[in-house]
Image: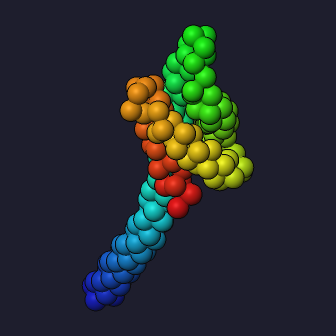
Amino acid sequence: MDKSLSSGTILHSSRRTLLKGAGGIAALAAMGLVQEAIGATSEHEHHHHVMEDTRARLIDSAMACIKAGDACNQHCIELFKSGDTSLAGCADSVQDMVATCTALTKLAASNSRHLKTMAQLCMNVAEDCEKECRKHADKHDECKSCANGCLECIDACKAYLA
């Protein structure tokens, strides 16, 4: 009887050890799956943050461009009041740039499905504005600031579209 008791105890003990070992293996396997899922999530989150960063850069550069454009436009108006219309082309291009940059900021903020199209358009309009303002950058700080703001916006659009 002692033998059967001891062999039953050994059998019970072996079963418990086996179950613990199986549980440990299952836990390790699950941890591997969890780590794999975490890795996939981290990669997705990284991609998501990169996209958020490029959209944030679009918004920031477009807002800076608008600010510089408004100052340039106001400078043009002051010159027009004195009879100087030499910056008429500049004023026209700034007007277009401010309109497209404003639309870009709104579409970027809402992550619109039309954002890529607007980023391309905004980049083209900012290129025109930069060229026009650059013509007057030597004489007018406002035009120089606007041209530089346009370059930053162009770079942000290119980065987003890449």
Asked if residue 55 can be seen in this view, the reply is: no
Q: Residue furthest right?
A: 114
Asked if residue 17 can be seen in this view, the reply is: yes
**In this rendering, is residue 104 above or below 64?**
below
Side of 160 relative to 15 (left or right): right
**In this rendering, is residue 161 above or below 128?**
below
Image mark count: 0
* Percent x, y of residue 64: 48, 31
The residue that appears at 69% across and 52% down in the rendered structure is 117
Query: Residue 138's quadrant in the figure?
Result: top left
Side of 154 relative to 80 (left or right): left
Q: Quadrant of the N terminus?
A: bottom left
Q: Residue furthest top?
A: 82
* Percent x, y of residue 139: 41, 27
Q: How is the image coloured?
A: rainbow
Query: Residue 46's quadrant in the figure?
Result: bottom left
Residue nearest the observer in this picture, 64 or 160 = 64
Query: Residue 23's quadrant in the figure?
Result: bottom left
The residue that appears at 57% across and 27% down in the rendered structure is 86
Residue nearest the observer in this picture, 56 or 10 = 56
The residue that appears at 36% across and 81% down in the rendered structure is 18
Residue nearest the observer in this picture, 25 or 41 = 41
The residue that appears at 62% across and 44% down in the rendered structure is 125
* Percent x, y of residue 118: 67, 47
* Percent x, y of residue 51: 52, 52
**In this rendering, is residue 128 above or below 93?**
below
**In this rendering, is residue 133 above or below 80?**
below
Side of 85 relative to 14 (left or right): right
Residue nearest the observer in this picture, 18 or 83 = 83
